[in-house]
Image: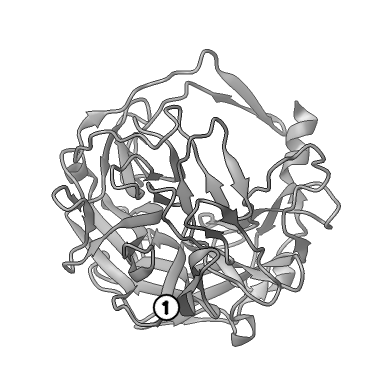
Amino acid sequence: MNHLSAKRASVFCVVSGLAVLSLAGRLMAQGRGPGSLQPDVFITVALHHDTPVARGNILILPSPATHATLAARGNGGATAAVAPSAAANALNLGTSSYGVGATYAPTTSQPEAEEEIAADPSDTSGQNLVSAISDFSQPSGFNFTKWALSSTGGASWSESFVPFNSGTDQLVTSDGRSWNANSDPVVAFDRTGNVFLSDLYLAVDSFGRITSEGLYVSTDTFSNLQNGNFGRTYRISANLNNKKTFTLEDKPWITVDNSGGATSGYVYASWSHFTGCQNKFSIFIGYYLTCSSDVLWLAYSKNHGQTWSTPITINPSGQNGAIQGSQVAVGPNGQVYVAYEFFGSGSQRQQYLSVGTWNGSTLSFAAPFAATPAFNDLNFAGCSNCTASYRVNSFPSLAVGPATTNNSAGNVYLVYGGQASSTSTAQVYFVSCTSSCTSSGAFAAPSILNRFLSESE
């Protein structure tokens, strides 16, 4: 979970890798050790500062008005302001040049975070887009997921929050639950024009303790969203009680099988499932959250997100407590790919991939394998002028291409940030596989994307 916002700077606890905001508003962040992994739950507090302040895994985000904007909310229809750029820029990648045109603002409020966007594969003109954003403008002080829609290829947008009760100022889901905040939005389309928006939902008490949480998906058609809001928000997985020790969902991703085959239309969600979580209290720092371990889960829906399978564990047990940042994608033959990052000792990281195949009604995943060499997590080495620490990660971004002459299952691509060593510069790495992408040896050595960009400038 990223950026849970608290309006009351003097009250909220918080939490990630034992990062905490005390009752007096003081910040303390303890880094994540090699032997433990905590959920990325972030409470972002808007204080009276002129510049952002970052300490460890906590970010204090000011707005131009020195506080989160308490704008009136509507359930949709308002057209966002448009801010075209003064001139187009040219981006040169190798021998091909791509024009970068005007810049448009999909939303009217700020600050925003965790932006995701998807295009409608059923729209041959390429004009239908839906974006999802974590928005910080709520009067309650918590962030709600906002979605924005464009039928003009991004030249104009309408915006709305996911369903909430304006009387109670709480988010609502179709199982009758009410929630204080949600986070980590991801959006996807299927080939018949259905939109799927997954995100995390959180309920907290007056002390800032998490009382329930869950991963949900909102669904509707693009045509309905042009004149309304998501009609249903279905539960994928949730902890709905207030036990002393509980589970927690984090870092979800969602995709749809658009292969046109027997499994076309199936929806997949992957996420980190934390166990042994507790709300703890210290007289020095207030309430904070700890979790003992985590596993990587995947669930699927065969009925457009209405009901979901029992989660499948993707990672081997030896990696429990040291995995995060999964993404799921589907190839042209219906194979399911899940990429994630493994946290080794110290700051060592490695990207893993697992491939799932349907056998009748059963989806089975092969043992994950390392798709990249080991590398160092980002630490911005050499930044001698940096006065603040920044939240960074090396999580993979995954894509599977269409069938080719040499690879009917589609080429597989991974992009991630990292460093060759703790003292080297940060790089953007690109890894590809063009045939039989089911083992480590099938993936090429990483290329450095930012090197090519700088050489072409």
Q: Residues within 10 Å of mark 1 (few under 14, many from 20)?
A: many
Q: Residue furthest left?
A: 167
Q: Nearer the viewer, residue 362 or 147?
A: 147
Q: Amino acid at mark 1?
A: Thr
Q: How many marks?
A: 1
Q: What is the quadrant of residue 399 in the picture?
A: bottom right
**Going by the image, does 50 lie left or right of 439?**
left
Report whether residue 339 is seen: no
Q: Nearer the viewer, residue 215 or 269?
A: 215
Q: Residue furthest bottom?
A: 317
- Residue 451, compared with residue 340, is above or below; it is above
Q: Quadrant of the image for the C terminus?
A: top right
**Going by the image, does 426 lie left or right of 232?**
right
What residue does disc 1 label? 247
- Residue 431, compared with residue 121, is above or below; it is below
Task: Estimate the x, y position of residue 124 in percent, counting from the top left.
Answer: 34, 39
Task: Estimate the x, y position of residue 340 in percent, counting from the top left.
Answer: 58, 67
Query: What residue is rendered at 48% in x and 72% in y?
Result: 281
Query: What residue is rendered at 48% in x and 80% in y?
Result: 275
Query: What residue is rendered at 36% in x and 49% in y?
Result: 143
Under tag 1, what secondary structure? strand
Task: Estimate the x, y position of residue 196 in percent, counting from the top left.
Answer: 31, 55
Query: What residue is rendered at 19% in x and 41% in y?
Result: 75
**Going by the image, does 93 lie left or right of 157?**
right
Report whether residue 115 is seen: yes
Task: Estimate the x, y position of residue 381 in percent, counting from the top left.
Answer: 81, 48
Q: Nearer the viewer, residue 107 or 126?
A: 107
Q: What is the quadrant of residue 405 in the picture?
A: bottom right
- Residue 369, compared with residue 138, is above or below; it is below
- Residue 154, compared with residue 450, is above or below; it is above
